[in-house]
Image: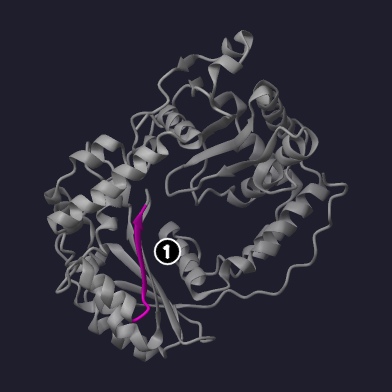
């Protein structure tokens, strides 16, 4: 147990690097930051929207397509492509979420030409060989089946389904088991051709080459990636769903998973920083009110967190904890008490300084490597943040007042809108507690 709260220390100096932008002959926009401590290049290619542009009934195709990008491309089959990466020590990782498909690349500068050639092949000419499609499908199906029995996954599936019913956010980026089983090779090819175009992408590069040299390398490689058609995207708004309290019976569960949430804010919300600080005080780090209560004082859990999952559209605000089965009712009571308390009892100057000190302290750690800087730049591009966002982050954070934090908490944390999901052994709960739920679901394996 913690006997006293440590005081935050002055943050160490940190300057996020400046960057320049230019376009290749095919329209691909490039953001480049010099980072010359080591002869390394880190890059991230960002293709906007991804899962939000999936055809109805083909949910999961964005992440399935991304999973196929390193399974053979251009002149190389899957084995040869993997060998080319391995022989030159090139790290290549594609994935897709709701907001974008991302391909991260890390290489020694001396192999930059080869690395970006492989990246060009992957985005412009992936093979989608049938045997590789089936092999990757089997891996994805196995992953979904493995997750399906995990209490945390079950809770999330029911929460997002309740919160975003009818919207793409209701499902995970991977989609459901049935979606992955039904997607055809031709579906992947068609989706790739529509989405993977340089005019709808941004390439972020961080490394040590001189500006002219990196331009030449990129023009010779990714500059040869052709455009096909223009695609227009209109985001689909979601309809606010009435809050529900759901109990999911998981026989023999050793702990209870508690998950509460409602839709939150998007990344460009004007209250982002005050809301971030309000969440820090509530459940964003070890010294938060929730953690000090449920872990340090009551001992109901090893850890509890709250978070605003910000996206291009409003993602969920949530509170999550695994608690002792016999303390489930008490834990949920304490969570709801702390939420009300944050709205009724304003954040103190001390709490604000502790939360601000934590964020200031971890800020430089998030950008120690070229890959981390590339990730930060891709966030600026993806969410259309100001170019100097990270260079002014600490100063902006310092200007947030307790009154702004309290106002943001009362605006963006809404107890009356919370959907509550509890996953545990129904037989271990009291009848009175179970009566507080709108529905008791006995089939926990929702895949």
* Left or right: where 415 falls relative to 7: left
Name the residue beneath numbered marker 1: 381
What residue is at 56 percent from the left and 27 percent from the top? 418
Can residue 241 be seen here? The reply is yes
Decide: is 259 above or below 70.
Answer: above
Q: Residue 391's spot in the image, x, y percent?
A: 60, 70
Q: Quadrant of residue 445?
A: top left
Q: Quadrant of residue 44?
A: bottom left
Q: Main secondary structure of the magenta part?
A: strand
Q: Nearer the viewer, residue 261 or 437?
A: 437
Helix, strand or loop for disc 1? helix
Can residue 244 be seen here? The reply is no
Q: Nearer the viewer, residue 397 or 117?
A: 117
* Left or right: where 92 falls relative to 405: left
Mark 1 burial class by Cα count in 10 Å: few <14, some 14-19, many 20+: some
Decide: is 291 above or below 336.
Answer: below
Magenta part of the chain: 88-96
What residue is at 24 percent from the left and 72 percent from the top? 81
What residue is at 15 percent from the left and 46 percent from the top? 184
Residue extending furthest right?
A: 3
Q: Residue 162's spot in the image, x, y percent?
A: 43, 27
Q: Residue 35's spot in the image, x, y percent?
A: 51, 82
């Amino acid at each position: 147990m913690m006997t006293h709260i440590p005081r935050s220390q002055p943050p160490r100096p940190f300057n996020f690097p400046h960057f320049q932008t230019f376009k290749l002959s095919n329209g691909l926009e490039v953001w480049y930051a010099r980072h010359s401590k080591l002869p390394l290049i880190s890059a991230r290619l960002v293709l906007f929207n991804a899962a939000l542009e999936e055809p109805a009934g083909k949910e999961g195709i964005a992440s399935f397509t991304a999973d196929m990008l390193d399974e053979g491309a251009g002149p190389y089959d899957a084995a040869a492509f993997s060998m080319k990466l391995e022989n030159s020590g090139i790290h290549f990782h594609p994935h897709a979420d709701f907001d974008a498909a991302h391909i991260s690349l890390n290489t020694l500068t001396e192999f930059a030409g080869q690395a970006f050639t492989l990246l060009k092949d992957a985005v412009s000419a992936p093979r989608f060989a049938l045997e590789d499609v089936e092999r990757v499908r089997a891996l994805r199906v196995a992953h979904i089946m493995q997750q399906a029995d995990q209490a945390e996954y079950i809770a999330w599936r029911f929460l997002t389904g309740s919160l975003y019913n009818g919207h793409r956010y209701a499902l995970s980026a991977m989609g459901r088991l049935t979606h992955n089983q039904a997607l055809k090779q031709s579906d992947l090819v068609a989706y790739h051709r529509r989405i993977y175009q340089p005019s709808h992408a941004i390439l972020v590069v961080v490394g040590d080459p001189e500006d002219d040299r990196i331009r030449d390398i990129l023009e010779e490689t990714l500059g040869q990636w052709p455009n096909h058609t223009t695609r227009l995207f209109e985001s689909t708004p979601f309809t606010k769903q009435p809050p529900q309290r759901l109990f999911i019976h998981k026989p023999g569960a050793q702990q209870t998973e508690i998950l509460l949430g409602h839709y939150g804010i998007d990344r460009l919300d004007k209250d982002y920083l005050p809301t971030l600080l309000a969440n820090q005080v509530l459940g964003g780090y070890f010294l938060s009110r929730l953690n000090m209560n449920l872990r340090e004082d009551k001992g109901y859990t090893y850890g509890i967190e709250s978070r605003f999952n910000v996206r291009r559209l409003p993602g969920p605000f949530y509170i999550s904890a695994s608690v002792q089965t016999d303390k489930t009712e008490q834990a949920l009571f304490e969570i709801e008490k702390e939420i009300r308390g944050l709205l009724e009892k304003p954040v103190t100057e001390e709490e604000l300084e502790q939360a601000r000190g934590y964020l200031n302290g971890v800020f430089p750690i998030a950008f120690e490597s070229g890959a981390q800087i590339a990730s930060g730049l891709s966030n600026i591009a993806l969410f259309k943040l100001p170019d100097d966002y990270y260079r002014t982050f600490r100063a902006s954070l310092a200007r947030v007042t307790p009154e702004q934090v309290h106002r943001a908490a009362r605006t963006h944390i809404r107890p009356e809108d919370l959907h509550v999901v509890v996953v545990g052994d129904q037989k271990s709960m009291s009848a009175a507690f179970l009566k507080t739920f709108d529905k008791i679901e006995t089939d926990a394996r929702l895949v």
